Amino acid sequence: MKTQVGIIGGGPSGLLLSQLLHLRGIDSVVLEKRSREHVLGRIRAGVLEHGFAKLMREAQVGERMDREGQIHDGFGIAHDGRVDRVDLKALTGGNTVIVYGQTELTRDLYEGRDRLGGVIVHNAEDVIPHGFDTHRPFLTYRNGSGAGRIDCDFIIGCDGFHGVSRQSIPRDRIRTFERVYPFGWLGVLTRTKPVSPELIYARHERGFALCSLRSPVLSRYYIQVPLTETVEEWPDESFFEELRRRLPREVASALETAPSIEKSIAPLRSFVVEPMQCGRMFLAGDAAHIVPPTGARGLNSAASDIYYLYNALLDHYSRGDSGGLENYSQRALARVWKGQRFSWWMTTLLHKFPDSSAFDQHLQQTELDYLFSSPRALASLAENYVGLPF
Ligand code: FAD
Ligand code: DHB
């Protein structure tokens, strides 16, 4: 098979890029390791910034998001037995976020690709990018129909943190930056009315907790757990009991529970690879950078990568101008690092670190006190949470 852009990974980044390119007459093929059901079974992001939503609309897949997504003007931070509100709209001069699940967004992208006849090869095993240092890169893979080869002009690695694209780049051509946190998030999805119409991020001496939602009848809750623990060690009753203990009393008493319909643990990690390109292969989204989920930046950081790549490819194909491709990494990384800083800061502010000293704990408390006593500090939090411009 021959195409213009060979995309590895059919998560939100890969699907969005292929849809945007298709609408501007640029051909692509997406190779996805898993089945469509598997990809749609992942429960991940819930909070989208408007920059991402704008791209979804440009890709002609934003209709359901605009109908069913909920605009959130603010969120709460619970600490010291109370909830303080971060009024995003007031603090940013009118900006908000959209609560719309990654699962739904991915479904919309698949439907968009199907509608236009986009090519997505599922269950593509042993995908390997070849020749990205030459003018003739190509991808090889295996699936139910045998071995396949895709010749293309460019390879885009959208295959997440564990994907093959970044790992195929020679070690001496990249540098990685990483911080692994000594805890994870145990997440539970339940068919219940959310405990609060707005998200509540909770700092507590027993550990962090987050009350989030997907719709007026679907709740998403998280608690910080040590990395040594497993889902099996957390039956629903224990999960909700621990969640209640980490919330202010009036919030805890309003919490409705029901059997979980999904439960998983996500480790927390900060990671960046530099540069985000090697020859004719470009990395985007989680393939190039990971953030701890605390600031809801992960998918939103992928959005700016896709925006820069999409425009760079358009310039290349429509005007023969390859400047955008040459500068992609530099441009993308400038925003990626700001997302890293914010996610690290939110994580440090709200989690319990097992090795923190009394001094560290004092600083954490002081940071929170400062935040809610300084409109300028709160405005900085809000500006980052709604998403910096790209
Ligand atoms: P992925 O979604 O990881 O997609 C990569 C795809 O590539 C996958 O489908 C995978 O199967 C495929 N693949 C992997 N290896 C190969 C291979 N070798 N060959 C072919 N295909 C391959 N972000 C936010 O912005 N807001 C939030 O509120 C938020 N909350 C989160 C909560 C949790 C608990 C977690 C874990 C993450 C959260 N994120 C959030 C982060 C967000 O989910 C990710 O940043 C996002 O999924 C990145 O999309 P992606 O397409 O780049 O990568
Ligand atoms: C959700 C996840 C996040 O990481 C976050 O910061 C907010 C919400 C969620 O899954 O709903």
Image (cartoon, rainbow, N blue to C red):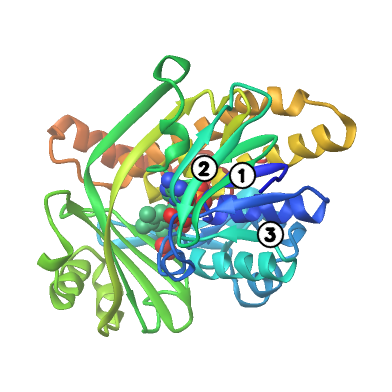
Which of marks 1 and 3 precedes in the sequence?
A: 3
**Where is mark 3, residue-wise?**
56
Q: Are marks 2 and 1 in contact (CB under 8 Å)?
A: yes
Tell me if residue 346 comes above or below residue 277 in the rendering.
Answer: below
Evaluate whether residue 51 shows in this view.
no
Q: Secondary structure at mark 3?
A: helix
* Percent position of residue 42, x then y: 40, 64
Res 340 → quadrant: top left
**Where is mark 2, residue-wise?**
140
* Percent position of residue 316, x then y: 80, 32
Q: Nearer the viewer, residue 262 or 205?
A: 262
390 vs 375, left or right, is right
Which of marks 2 and 3 precedes in the sequence?
A: 3
323 vs 238, left or right, is right
Give, as a three-letter code, the residue at label 3.
Met
Q: Tag 2: Cα neighbours inside 10 Å, few (<14), some, or many (≥20)?
A: some
Q: Nearer the viewer, residue 194 or 122?
A: 122
Query: In the rendered view of the protein, which quadrant contains the C terminus?
Result: top right
Spatial distance from mark 2 to mark 1, Cα to Cα? 6 Å
Give, as a three-letter code, the residue at label 1.
Ile
